[in-house]
Image: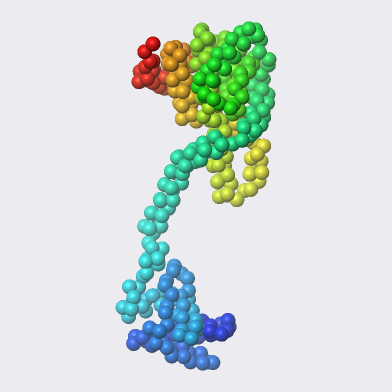
Amino acid sequence: MTLSGTYYAASSSRALEVSVRLEADGTLYIESPEFNRVELMRTCPLSDPLGRMARHFTLPDGARLEITDVTALAAWEQSCGKRTGMHFVHGLESRWRWVGAAVLFLLVFMAVGYIWGLPFAAKRIAMRLPPKIGAVATDQARAIFTRLFDFEPSKLSAERRQKIEQQFQTMAAVMEPGNQRNYRLEFFAALFPNAFALPDGLVCITDELIEEAKDDKEIYGVLAHEIVHVREQHGLRSVLQNSAVFLIWTLMTGDISTVAGLGSALPAMLAESGYSRGFEEEADLGAAAYMIQAGWGTKPLADILQRIDPEHAHLGDVGEALSTHPLTEKRVQALTDYEKTHPAPAP
Ligand SMILES: [Zn+2]
């Protein structure tokens, strides 16, 4: 069998086009107008096949002989029974089944990373961020919220606010013992009942939510829910998780212009991306744990969740969670179930 090849002498990088003759007895003839060489193939190791890449013989004196027609070479190898014809790597690449399996593995790997790895990393990072970052994010998000929701100063009496704030501080101290956060409560007048938490411990509540409550325990239930959002840093975790997806997408698509805007977009993301279902559940159950311990049971929180009209509470945290009725029902059910399995300690 005769193939064309490229010959590189050991001492030179000059490429010479040659004709290569492979004999069944294992002799290799390299022929060109300039020179002829004869070698025994067993003294000239041949590189392994790798896809469509050229293969080469290494001659005893270090010269190299490159063969680009790898298909013909493989056919010749097979016909001589010199090799199995296909090496592992080559076979792997030629079989779409393996490619399919590799793609599937990659997808599963990415999904696992997305579902478990990313939230895990986001939590670890959020919990270790310097407090200054939470404070800056809080200030900016507060400004955005105020503008977005047309917040005005609260019209509640100072006495009323003081009472609620006092209970809020008591709960924060019990729910996150020894915390270094700046837990504080701010009251606003708005168009709808709402409450939300920001990373450094600022919780905002509207007069309208307070007025909806038939019992102060309902307000405290909502505040307990918000304290869990702060304690577990759900806000920063959401932002980190969302921006990681955003960042990976940007790396994949190569559109770098979006990354530059990310820093300034953080507060907006904090303000606009509602919490995930999982975070809401964690906040509800954390609140339930406190309420059961306080001897109130979970009913006050369930009651106010059901009372607030989802039509009006269309923005922000509580509003977000209430935007669909089935979700409210699920949350109320989860609260009831939690209480059944976590009864109050005997007095
Ligand atoms: Zn919430």
Q: Nearer the viewer, residue 320 or 158?
A: 158
Residue that protrudes farthest toward the front in the picture: 178
Total number of numbered discs in the rendering: 0
Which residue: 41% across, 87% down? 28
Q: Nearer the viewer, residue 218 or 69?
A: 218
Q: Is residue 274 left or right of residue 139?
A: left
Give above or below for 267 relative to 70. above
Quarter of the image containing the N terminus?
bottom left
Give above or below for 30 relative to 214. below
Q: Is residue 155 left or right of residue 317?
A: right
x then y, percent, for residue 323: 51, 22
Rendering quarter of residue 238: top right
Q: Nearer the viewer, residue 68 or 113?
A: 113
Colour mode of the rendering = rainbow
x then y, percent, for residue 336: 39, 17
Which residue: 59% across, 36% down? 129
x then y, percent, for residue 274: 54, 28
Give above or below for 281 relative to 117. above
Would residue 67 be seen by someone viewing this image from the given angle? no
Which residue: 54% across, 92% down? 34
Quarter of the image containing the C terminus?
top left
Would residue 283 be seen by someone viewing this image from the given angle? yes
Give above or below for 264 relative to 333. below
x then y, percent, for residue 94: 39, 64
Residue that protrudes farthest toward the left in the picture: 81
Which residue: 64% across, 43% down? 258
